Image (spheres, grey):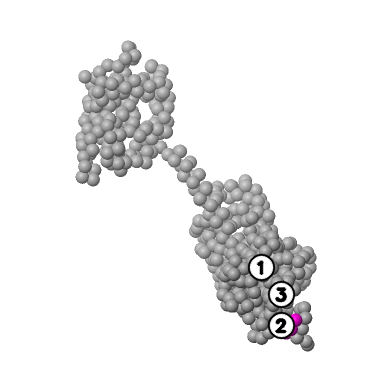
Amino acid sequence: MTDTPCNGAVIASDEFCRVLNLLCPMHVLLDATGHVVQVGPTLQKLRPDAPMQGRRVLELFDLQRPRRVSSMADLHAIAGQKLHLEMRDAPHTRLKGVLAPLPSGGGAVINLSFGISVLDAVRDYALTSADFAATDLTMEMLYLVEAKSAAMEASRQLNQRLQGAKIAAEEQAFTDTLTGLKNRRALDYILDRLCHDHVPFTLMHLDLDYFKAVNDTHGHAAGDHVLQQAARAMLGQIRKNDIVARVGGDEFILLLLDLDDRAVLDGIAERVIGRIEEPVPFNGKSCRISASIGIAFWSPEACLSPAELIEQADMALYAAKDAGRAQHRFYDSGAGAQTAAE
Amino acid sequence: MHGLINRSIQSFVCQTYGDDLWRRIMRHADLGYDEFESMLSYEDAITYQVLDLLGADLSRDRDDLLEDLGTYLVSHPELEGLRRLLRFAGTSYSEFLHSLDDLPDRTRLAVADLHLPRMELREHTPGQFSLTCYPGIPGFGHVIMGVLRAMADDYGALVMLQHEGQKDGVEVLSIALVDMRFAEGRQFDLGAGLAS
């Protein structure tokens, strides 16, 4: 057994070199002049066609932190510190390292690792588990990276499906979530059913007046509260089988079944408007709104489509608005104009 | 039961026997849904109800189905990720066998609420092992049988496996490793699973 390992310079024994290869497959053994005497098998695998042995270590690696290291004496001075290095030729793999001086002869060992760049390194250099020391946690880390990616992907897919299901459920819902009234979708369905079943009914199109001012002055929370109170006001004035739907931000449609008596409808419309005009307290403030209503009739004989009926109610509603709001108007089929209720 | 397990069964049935059979089974089960979500949790009884309906429909033993499930988990291309995770355990089949003790812990690192039964490998004579699967998931030993069989192919090892039955929920498998390097085996490229 001789003490002339690697390339002749007596720096370390054969046994020591074998120990280094086993425990630190990414080490660089340096002589007193900073030349590479031995390099760990995994580190050499990064440059299979360019033997590192015999070259100056600072030619192979750019020491990025700490800076201003150009000699072996400088290197000895930073022994024990964490080193940040980068390979000088491409691919410029980043490495972490630490230098330990040899007990005699002026040489040193630098042990290197990939740090967080290990993921790229494994791919770039086709590394296998045999390239890492048996105690190295890299394999566990790679395992975790893959396992977590798979779990995240499963979670992502679940979220996507839930999102799709939520949208589908909303699309299929018949209820306005804020007021608990029927929504536009439900109304369309009911209108079709009523027309199909030849049930005569009266349609009231109600639009809140001054609602925007409440929203702007007191905020959306106040606006939402006012909408809920308005919904309650409407529900309080209709019969059990009648229907109230919220069809827009501050627009509602009431369907009154088997009812076409104008005097009764006058009463209902006036009471609904009256109730809606009652001040709504909210957070110590008082919110005041009103409502305009346009009314149109549907009978099996008239042969109106739901869209035509709503259009007639709209015309009556505009007439009520034009007349100064806070009132109701009937659509007059004879003249195509609107007649005042009062 | 963890949704991942139920979802695996669903995936196994759909890929092996077709979507129609799966829908039929789920209709019979009358659960109100016909797909399992891998990240949700389900009553254990549901899993065994589905397995029993499946066994009845295919006229097959539940144990056999579970072993097929295990094989499917490792060998189907759609579940390449799982095979890779298992291959991380060791570079040879024997190392893989010895890593089974760690499998429940490894699994929990990946999915914190997925609890697999504890396993214990004993080497009686060189190449002659027994694997004890402790209680937790009835029939788990049969799934592991399928996994071990498929992983042997993966490593290119020749093994003989036998389920020695269960007692008080403890299942024992005997494993005879005849030849570690019987065939070529499949490649395990360490970097292949990492996004580029």
- C-alpha gap between disc 1 and disc 2: 21 Å
Q: Are marks 2 and 3 in contact (CB under 8 Å)?
A: no
Q: What residue did someone put label 3 on? A: A36
- C-alpha gap between disc 1 and disc 3: 12 Å
Mark 1 element type = strand
Mark 3 element type = strand
Which amino acid is tagged 3? Val
Tell which residue pokes out farthest to the bottom in this image: A1
**Nearer the N terminus, badge 2 or badge 3?**
2
Q: Is residue B115 above or below residue A220?
A: below
Label 3 CA crowd tier, 10 Å (few <14, some 14–19, many 20+) = many
Query: In the drawing, does residue B11 fall left or right of residue A331?
Result: right
**Nearer the N terminus, badge 1 or badge 3?**
3
Query: In the drawing, does residue A233 fall left or right of residue B169?
Result: left
**Nearer the N terminus, badge 1 or badge 2?**
2
Q: Position of residue A96 (x, y in %)?
A: 60, 69
The residues colored magenta run: A9-13
**The N terminus of chain A: image quadrant:** bottom right
Which amino acid is tagged 1? Phe
**The C terminus of chain A: image quadrant:** top left
Q: What residue did someone put label 1 on? A: A61
The residue depicted at 59 percent of the width and 69 percent of the height is A68
**Chain of the residue on which disc 2 is drawn:** A
Q: What residue did someone put label 2 on? A: A11
**Chain of the residue on which disc 1 is drawn:** A
Q: Main secondary structure of the magenta part?
A: loop
